[in-house]
Every structure is written in C-alpha cells, then in structure tokens.
C-alpha cells in the first residue's frame, strides 16, 4: 500500500483551466426548424428540431486548455497550454419534451400575456420529487433526445505553449 505522500514528492499540485470558448457556425440554421411543436398523436409531447452546419460553413467549437503540474522544484513540473478544436460539418438535434400545464391557470390566462414566455412557464406544475413521473404531478420532462452528426467530427489540437515536447507531435 502506498500513501498519498509519495505523489506529493513528484507533484504537489495539479491545476486545469478552460478559457476562451468560441463557437462558430451558429448562423447556419437549416430547415426544418421546430420549436415546441405539439405532436399530433399526443397532446403533451412537444417536438423540437434544430439543424446547424453546412458544407462550406461547419459548426466549429474551440477552447483553450491549460494544465499546470507541480511547482518549479517538482521533477514532474509542466505547464502546457493547448488549443482544442472540434469541427462538426453538420449536426441535427431532435428533442421531445413532455409538458403539462395547470388547467385552472390556463382557463384564467390573460390574453395580454400570450407572448410572455414567463407567464406560460408559470403554468407548468412543479414536481414534489416523490411522484416525479406520475401523470398528475409532472410538469416538464425530457421525453427523448437525439443528436446526429453528419460527416463525423474532426478533432484538432495545437500547442500554444507546451513544456512537454511530445505534445507538439500530437497532431502529426
């Protein structure tokens, strides 16, 4: 059995940070787009569909990842800053929500609030946690979600500042 003290002799700390998140291609919405569209077969199911990315403008996300290990006196001391990038030529998100509203509140719903989302959301009952999926008590639940990646995903990394030389060769 080894104690945790042996690891402190090599590295007394590990610090990881993520910064500079960017997402490009959010302006590539494609048809069909559905938002809270009632399903004909069920009054409580709301369909949502969103498609992003095109052949000439994919969805592209990047983040800067930094990992510092140990102090300057540690034999494992390292400080690596890398750009991590994920390219997705096309993504389609399909989600179905199960939603119920309080009938008494709906009957008294003022027409002046018909475009106010907060008023609509206030009609969804809050679950007490015990009967979470009972028909009487449920308010809002994710019934189904599917994320489809057309064309796969392309992951790339690049060292911004790496003290470990083997990270420079990661993409080669």
Image (spheres, grey):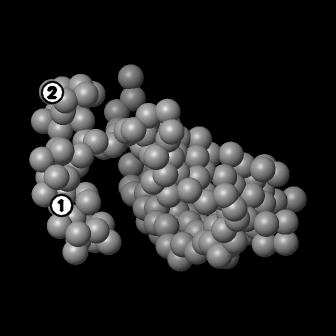
- Picture quadrant of residue 32: bottom right
Location of residue 42 in the rendering, given as x and y in whole percent from the top left corner: 44, 34
Alpha carbon distance from label 1 to label 2: 29 Å
Determine if residue 86 is in view. Answer: no
Task: Give the structural element (helix, strand or loop) at label 1.
Answer: loop
Residue 109 shows which numbered tag? 1
* Residue 82: x %, y % from top left: 64, 68
Q: Which quadrant would residue 128 be assigned to in this image?
A: top left
Please name whichever residue, 166 or 98, is drawn nearer the observer in this view of the structure.
98
Q: Is residue 160 left or right of residue 41?
A: right
Q: Nearer the viewer, mark 1 or mark 2?
A: 1
Residue 117, can we see it?
Answer: yes
Instruction: Classify the position of the N terminus by image quarter.
Output: top left
Query: Looking at the picture, does residue 93 appear above or below residue 118?
Result: above
Rendering coords of residue 90 (x, y %): 74, 58
Residue visible at 65% across and 76% down?
A: 27
Residue 63, position in %: x, y? 58, 69
Q: Residue at x 16, y 52 (%)?
A: 107
Quadrant where the C terminus is found in the figure:
bottom right
Q: Which mark is residue 130?
A: 2
Position of 8 relative to 131 (above/below): below
Report the disc number at residue 121.
none
Seen in the picture, residue 157 relative to 149 is either above or below; the reply is: below
């Amino acid at each position: 059995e080894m104690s945790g003290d042996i690891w402190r002799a090599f590295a007394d700390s590990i610090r990881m940070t993520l910064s500079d998140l960017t997402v490009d291609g959010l302006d590539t919405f494609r048809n069909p787009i559905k938002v809270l569209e009632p399903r004909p077969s069920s009054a409580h199911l709301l369909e949502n569909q969103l498609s992003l990315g095109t052949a000439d403008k994919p969805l592209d996300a990047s983040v800067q990842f930094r990992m510092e290990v140990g102090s300057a006196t540690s034999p494992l001391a390292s400080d690596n800053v890398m750009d991590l990038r994920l390219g997705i030529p096309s993504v389609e998100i399909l989600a179905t929500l199960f939603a119920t509203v309080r009938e008494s509140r709906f009957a008294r719903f003022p027409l002046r609030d018909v475009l106010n989302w907060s008023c609509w959301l206030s009609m969804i009952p809050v679950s007490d946690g015990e009967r979470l999926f009972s028909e009487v008590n449920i308010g809002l639940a994710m019934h189904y979600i599917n994320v489809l990646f057309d064309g796969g995903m392309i992951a790339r990394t690049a060292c911004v500042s790496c003290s470990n030389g083997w990270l420079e060769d990661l993409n080669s």
